[in-house]
Amino acid sequence: MSKRASAGPESIGHFFNPKSVAIIGASAKQKKIGYVIAKNFIESFKGKFFMVNPTVGEVLSCPAFPSVKSIPGEVDLAVVAVPAKLVTGVLEDCGEKGVGAAVIITSGFKEIGGEGVKLEEELVRIGKEHGIRLMGPNCMGVFDSTTMVDTLFIPRYRLKRAPRGNIAFISQSGASGIAFLDWAAGERIGISKFASYGNASDVDEADLLEFLAADRETNVIAMYIEGIKDGRKFANVAREVTATKPVLVLKSGATASGAKAALSHTGSLSGSDEIFDAVVRQTGMIRVYDWEEMFDIARVLAYQPAAKGERIAVITNGGGAGVMIADEIEKHGMKLAAIGEKTLAGLRAKFPPHVALRNPMDLAGDADNERYRDAITAVLADDSVDSLLLVCIPHTPGIDLESFVDVVIDSSRKNNKPMVVCLPGGRIAFEIRELFEENGIPTYPTPMRAALSLSALVKYGSLRSNLSCAKC
Ligand code: COA
């Protein structure tokens, strides 16, 4: 009996918010993948879960069932971690049980060619016949920071789970997903949902995008992909989703060597990079080219409002950093705002004559917190400014490190204009950067990273206003 009424986005909910889960291949042997997954569920899952293993009576003090069919009551989600040759049989059992979805961790399918391709076709057939949504095979599966479904087979002492937040990350590659999650946990950046969908035999990038578009916990969607399963479906879904949430996409396999590697990694055809670029432009997604960029932009989109225009004010206490930022602003298609004469006159009356009242505004090496407070308040209130890029060299003696973050937050509070901070430097800068981040102000060590991230808010703001113009 099929549990699934349709293959629509609601069926994807079984993966993230199941009431009951069967861990098939659960193991008490510490080095096994089935052990880590069982432990994850024991330690944090909020719903019911059952261990399935025909060779033992219990796993980690939980009773083990010989098959999913012998579990009393319903099972929404099966997590499958048994060798490839056993997966079809296990999936048939799931079908008879009426399981709604299965995460298939196991490798050895389409990505190895030959028999693996046939085996994967068989999985898809069984899934369709019984109405089971399939994630994988050859994947890490799911992490949900609210329900605490956690099928990642990386032990927690090696990968601290990221805190709750509103960035969702979907990744065709499990390892790339882990790198992103580890980074997020280290920087205490909140994640709403994570899915590694491997060979995309059934659930693909478009299905996950569509589901996340409606997810209340998610404000920003970041994706890593190697190839698109169904280009038309993906483009249609992406166009719809970007109207309500920003979508960041990192696609590899752009060169002949990368495309060959993608084929043997997840069995994906990378396709033409030019065509993919055109799809990105037409659908309003934001393309990024490496992990750092993805991470930098994801958090700025998660924490700051979209910019209403491209006019940027720069306030700094270091002239050189101001010049570098000016270059980066132009390189990333933004403009230095022409700060109004009234604003400048007001600041002229307060500041010593060596403060350079232009844009970038150089508050000079003796700037203190109060000078920053006055400058930020005045510049953000100016109608000719859409966003602020604030630079601070924290080593200068006038800056009171203890209260600097509070001063910046306090003086920016009255305006809902985007702000990012560039705080170059080592140990001292690192601590203040963390404080800014904890308060929702993305902070970067280099001018280039700060400007690039701000440009994403400008791009997304322009997309939003084009869409609302198209509707009026
Ligand atoms: N139902 C449930 N459990 C079963 C079973 C069945 N029908 N048949 C066997 N099992 C049990 C086994 O007895 C074993 O339990 P034990 O540890 O108590 O002995 C457990 O399931 C696992 O089976 P095992 O044969 O020991 O396999 P394994 O743990 O060595 O490997 C995989 C299984 C899935 C991990 C492996 O095949 C694999 O694919 N590894 C790569 C995974 C990967 O990289 N995925 C992609 C990530 S991006």
Image (cartoon, grey):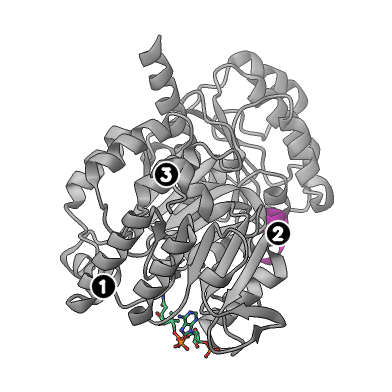
Q: Earlier in the sequence, mark 3 or mark 2?
A: 2
Query: Which residue is the extreme one toward the top?
Result: 472
Does the magenta stretch mainly form a helix, a strand or a loop?
helix
The structure residue drawn at horizontal position 68% and vertical position 59%, both measured from the top left corner, is: 47
Instruction: Report the quarter where the C terminus lies.
Output: top left
Q: Report the span colored magenta.
A: 426-434
Q: Position of residue 413 (x, y in %)?
A: 74, 30
Q: Earlier in the sequence, mark 1 or mark 2?
A: 2
Q: Characterize the local packing of mark 3: few (<14), some (14-19) or many (20 or more) Cα atoms within 10 angstroms.
A: many
Residue kind at label 1, given as amino acid type: Leu
Q: Which residue is mark 1?
A: 119
The structure residue drawn at horizontal position 47% and vertical position 48%, both measured from the top left corner, is: 12
What is the C-alpha distance between the residues marked 3 and 2?
25 Å
Contact? badges 3 and 2 (CB < 8 Å): no
Q: Nearer the viewer, residue 461 or 96?
A: 96
Q: Which residue is mark 2?
A: 46
Residue kind at label 3, given as amino acid type: Leu
Q: Is residue 175 above or below residue 35?
A: above
Q: Is residue 183 above or below residue 61?
A: above
